[in-house]
Amino acid sequence: MNVKNIQRINLPLTKEDVLSLHAGDIVLINGLIVTGRDRVHNFLFNKKPSKKQIPFNLEGTILYHCGPIIRKTGKDFKLIAGGPTTSIRVEMYEHQIISEYGIRGVMGKGGMGEQTLNALKENGCVYLHTIGGAGVYLADRVKRIVDVWKLEEFGVTEAMWMFEVENFPAIVTMDAHGRSLHEGIEKKSYNEFKRLIGL
């Protein structure tokens, strides 16, 4: 891999930053990201808390589909593993969350659907695919746990955590220009399947 092809991006992102990214770009992320799985997405979608009610500034950040494994040590928390969860499970929520909270990136594994792809294009946001099965390695890219929201109510894996990350690796697989590598792979796989069975 040519290191020159890797872009370092610093959070928070602007719309202009996002528009400079394209499907296929490899990035190293630096700055503050937040986690969110099913319960956080459901809460943001259905309860619609105002930006003032959320203790984190979501403008320009990346929402990471991650259920982290975290150990409490005294008053502090230590991240043990922080790999991505499957993103399509929150497809029904993501378009609204992107639109309402100013998120510039969504990160997980496996890609998302057409509704999210349209929201990325309309709002200036990207989908980032990171490494599945590498939770411990990715945890090493987290410099510190900054804060947590909804811990008592949702539990450790479903709470929203804020992490400060350094050189956190990902690939842009859905961009703000309407391109999805996942869609392309799906079409290619389907055509190959039809060829193999003689259709």
Image: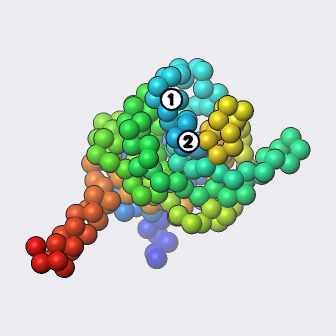
Which residue has dot 2 on it? 36
Q: Is residue 36 above or below residue 22?
A: above
The C terminus - image quarter? bottom left
Q: Quadrant of residue 75?
A: top right
Q: Is residue 176 above or below residue 1?
A: above
Q: Between 112 and 98, which is closer to the camera in this rendering?
A: 112
Name of the residue lying farthest toward the right = 74
Instruction: Tell me the kind of residue under disc 1.
Output: Leu
Measured in 3D between alpha carbons, the distance from the residue under mark 1 to the one under mark 2, in whole angstroms, is 10 Å
Across the whole image, how many numbered discs are drawn on residues?
Answer: 2
Residue at image point 47% right, 37% down: 103
Instruction: Tell me the kind of residue under disc 2.
Output: Gly
Q: Quadrant of residue 153?
A: top right
Q: Is residue 40 above or below residue 108?
A: above
Q: Is residue 11 visible?
A: no
Q: Is residue 174 above or below residue 16?
A: below
Q: Position of residue 140 (x, y in %)?
A: 69, 61
Residue at image point 16% right, 72% down: 194
In the picture, measured across the screen, residue 86 lies left or right of residue 199, that is: right
Disc on res. 151: none
Disc on res. 44: 1
Residue at image point 61% right, 41% down: 158
Residue at image point 54% right, 47% down: 64
Mark 1 / mark 2, whichever is N-terminal: 2
Name of the residue lying farthest toward the front = 197
Query: Residues at badges 1 and 2 in contact (C-beta under 8 Å)?
Result: yes
Q: Secondary structure at mark 1?
A: helix
Q: Position of residue 69 (x, y in %)?
A: 69, 53
